[in-house]
């Protein structure tokens, strides 16, 4: 009887120590650990790199069995359908973060502080949801005549591997000038509520431009002015 009780006890202990497969795991970093595949197994044992932010890795039954054998994990596959999915959630980098990094590099290269930066073809790289990446620009190629530029954008941060991507765009110098809030007809006498201050590309300017609303209030337009266009032709 004592022998039977002892055997039952050993079986219970063996079952308690057996690992359970984790069919779905959300990662919080670039490294996959043994614990990400099996519960109660190898908390600090590194298996290798995981997916990129926003990506996933699927570990099928045969590979799971091989890993279990290699690391002496008490787990056996019962079906070819056994699998583990490892996901690392990601989010697109904010475009404003890339523009801010480009602005720093451009001003260091001699561009004016008063510029608009167009990244219309920008495809934001995915970064970890929990990360706060720092963006930096290197290898800047800037043509001040055309305003075109190309550069390498590097993202670094705690809990993530560096991410490199090539970016390009255009720079326009701008000034602040009054523009029409709505379409204005010829002979309109300008009032304060007809205009607002906006950033205007200097390349579109041909004549001296008023820089404040006070400079044009009470003046009369010679030509119609479309909404959003600068009020530059008062008499």
Image (cartoon, rainbow, N blue to C red):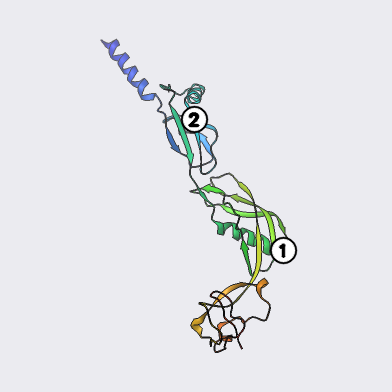
The residue pinned by badge 1 equals 146
In this orientation, which residue lies closer to the viewer: 164 or 79?
79
**Residue 59 image label:** 2
Q: Position of residue 211 (x, y in %)?
A: 61, 80
Q: Is residue 60 above or below residue 87?
A: above
Name the residue nearer the viewer: 190 or 26.
Answer: 190
Check disc 1: other Cα within 10 Å, few if <14, some if 14-19, many if 20+: few
SS under mark 2? strand
Residue 233's x, y, as percent? Answer: 62, 83
Packing grade of label 2 (10 A; few <14, some 14-19, many >=20) is some
Camera-nearest label, 2 or 1? 1
Q: Spot the residue most to the left.
A: 1
- Front residue of 7/80: it is 80
Query: In this figure, what is the number of numbered marks?
Result: 2
Numbered label attached to residue 58? none
User: In the rendered image of this protein, does residue 227 appear above or below residue 20?
Assistant: below
Looking at the rendered structure, the secondary structure element under dot 1 is loop
Residue, x 58% and y 80% (percent of image)? 231
214 with respect to 148 (left or right): left
Looking at the picture, does residue 174 appear above or below residue 223?
Answer: above
| Disc 2/disc 1 C-alpha distance (Å) | 50 Å
For the C terminus, give its image quadrant. Answer: bottom right
Q: Are marks 2 and 1 in contact (CB under 8 Å)?
A: no
> Dividing the image into 4 quarters, which one contains the N terminus?
top left
Q: Quadrant of residue 230?
A: bottom right
Q: Position of residue 146 (x, y in %)?
A: 72, 63
Which is nearer the N-term, disc 2 or disc 1?
Answer: 2
Residue at (63, 54) in percent of width and height: 136
Q: Is residue 21 above or below residue 118?
A: above
Q: Position of residue 216 (x, y in %)?
A: 58, 86
């Amino acid at each position: 009887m004592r022998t039977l009780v002892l055997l039952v006890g050993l079986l219970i202990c063996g079952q308690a120590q057996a690992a359970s497969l984790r069919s779905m795991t959300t990662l919080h970093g670039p490294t996959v650990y043994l614990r990400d595949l099996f519960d109660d197994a190898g908390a600090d044992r590194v298996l290798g790199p995981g997916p990129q932010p926003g990506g996933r890795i699927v570990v099928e039954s045969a590979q799971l069995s091989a890993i279990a054998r290699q690391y002496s994990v008490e787990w056996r596959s019962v079906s070819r359908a056994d699998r583990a999915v490892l996901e690392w959630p990601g989010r697109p980098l904010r475009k404003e973060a890339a523009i801010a990094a480009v602005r720093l590099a451009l001003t260091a290269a001699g561009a004016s502080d008063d510029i608009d930066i167009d990244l219309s073809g920008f495809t934001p790289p995915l970064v970890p949801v929990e990360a706060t990446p720092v963006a930096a620009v290197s290898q800047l190629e800037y043509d001040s005549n055309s305003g075109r530029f190309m550069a390498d954008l590097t993202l670094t941060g705690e809990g993530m591997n560096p991410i490199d991507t090539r970016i390009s765009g255009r720079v326009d110098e701008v000034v602040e000038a009054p523009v029409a809030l709505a379409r204005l007809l010829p002979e309109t006498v300008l009032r304060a509520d007809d205009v607002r201050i906006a950033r205007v590309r200097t390349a579109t300017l041909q004549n001296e431009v008023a820089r404040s609303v006070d400079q044009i209030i009470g003046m009369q337009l010679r030509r119609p002015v479309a909404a959003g266009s600068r009020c530059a032709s008062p008499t």
